[in-house]
Image: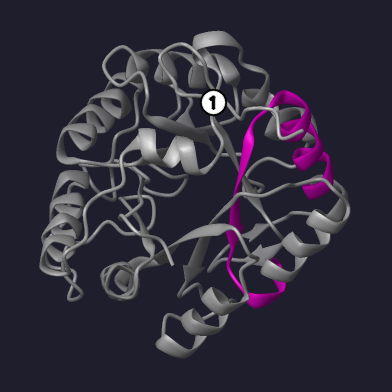
């Protein structure tokens, strides 16, 4: 069980567009500003997606990630930053791993690692065993911690397989994502089984897809876990979908629930220490695990 509350902020994602909601940050400056506001409200880490500035489509390019990270670190030099390595739009290793080769003050601390292929409502996220292992190997070599993303029980088991192959090493951080149409559903039974199955020396957050975000965030806060929250997973403030949310709306609500449960937000500094990450302020990524 986690002590203080890990808040993993997901401001953009790959799906929300300005046509869907005017509040989703798309440009570099919008993403930087939303993360700035979030850091003032209180977050532990941020999970970034980049967009092509000309088309607003998702982008893997490290040059765009570099601009976002540079902007964030001007005012939050210790915020834990994770870049997306998603297989939803990009299928080649050199595309998906591009941001992992940023250096110095632009280096991400973590990279997302989805632990199997899966189907969303209209599209598949393809993550072959070789792709997963290759991404894990690059992160290990580059000193970047994996953000382990599990949508189902089998994905947690695959993390244990990667551990046996010495491609990942503890301490671990898991996002347990519930409510996707083809994966674990957003209920207490599925959540409990997945929480129970994470390896020793793991920290975890619950995420709920769409309308399930509030339910899974509330459950996780109550039972001692962390939360993944933001417009990436849910653009609505209410389950009847009458009010579009801002990222600040969603974060402020999580803070209200946390306060009611006596949970303090875990600082980036505390999370860095627990995850064996460098302290920030010019030095990023994971310390040597040897």
Q: Is residue 132 left or right of residue 244?
A: right
On the rendered image, what quadrant is the C terminus found in? top right
Judged from the image, the secondary structure of the residue bearing numbered disc 1 is: loop
Pointer 1 local density, CA inside 10 Å: few below 14, some 14–19, many at least 20: many
**Residue found 56% across the figure and 64% down from its top:** 122
**Residue found 43% across the figure and 33% down from its top:** 80
Q: Is residue 264 left or right of residue 211?
A: left
Foreground: 17 or 193? 193
Q: Which residues are magenta?
A: 132-155
Can residue 57 be seen here? The reply is no
Q: Is residue 141 magenta?
A: yes
**Residue found 26% across the figure and 69% down from its top:** 214
On the rendered image, what quadrant is the N terminus found in? bottom left
Q: Quadrant of residue 228?
A: bottom left
User: Which residue is denoted by mark 1 in the rendering?
Assistant: 108
Q: Quadrant of residue 162?
A: bottom right
Where in the figure is residue 234, as x and y percent of width and height?
32, 59
Q: Residue furthest front?
A: 290
Q: Is residue 168 left or right of residue 62?
A: right
Can residue 91 be seen here? The reply is yes
Q: Is residue 232 magenta?
A: no
Where in the figure is residue 127, as x and y percent of width and height?
75, 54
Residue 33's place in the image compared with 180, above or below, is above
**Residue found 64% across the figure and 31% down from its top:** 144
Q: Is residue 68 left or right of residue 261?
A: right
Where in the figure is residue 132, as x and y percent of width and height?
78, 49
């Amino acid at each position: 069980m986690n002590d203080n509350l890990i808040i993993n902020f997901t401001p953009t994602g790959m799906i929300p567009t300005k046509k869907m909601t005017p509040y989703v940050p798309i440009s570099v400056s919008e993403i930087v500003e939303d993360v700035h506001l979030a850091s003032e409200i209180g977050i532990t880490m941020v999970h970034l997606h980049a967009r092509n500035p000309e088309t607003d489509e998702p982008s893997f390019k490290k040059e765009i990630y570099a601009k976002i990270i540079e902007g964030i670190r001007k005012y939050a030099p210790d915020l834990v930053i994770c870049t997306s390595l998603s297989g939803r739009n990009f299928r080649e290793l050199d595309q998906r791993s591009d941001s992992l080769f940023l250096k110095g003050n632009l280096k991400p601390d973590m990279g997302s690692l989805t632990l199997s292929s899966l189907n969303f409502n209209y599209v598949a996220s393809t993550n072959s065993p070789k792709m997963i292992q290759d991404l894990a190997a690059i992160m290990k070599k580059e000193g970047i911690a994996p953000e382990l993303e599990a949508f189902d029980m089998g994905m947690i088991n695959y993390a244990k397989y990667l551990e046996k192959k010495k491609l990942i090493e503890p301490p671990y951080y898991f996002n347990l994502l519930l409510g996707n149409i083809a994966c674990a559903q957003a209920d207490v039974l599925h959540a409990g089984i997945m929480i129970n199955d994470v390896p020793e020396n793991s920290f975890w957050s619950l995420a709920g897809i769409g309308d399930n975000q509030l339910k899974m965030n509330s459950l996780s806060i109550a039972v001692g876990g962390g939360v993944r929250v933001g417009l990436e997973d849910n653009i609505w403030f209410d389950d009847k979908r009458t009010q579009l949310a801002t990222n600040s709306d969603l974060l402020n609500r999580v803070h209200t629930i946390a306060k009611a449960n006596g949970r303090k937000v875990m600082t980036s500094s505390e999370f860095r220490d627990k995850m064996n990450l460098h302290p920030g302020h010019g030095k990023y990524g994971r310390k040597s695990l040897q």
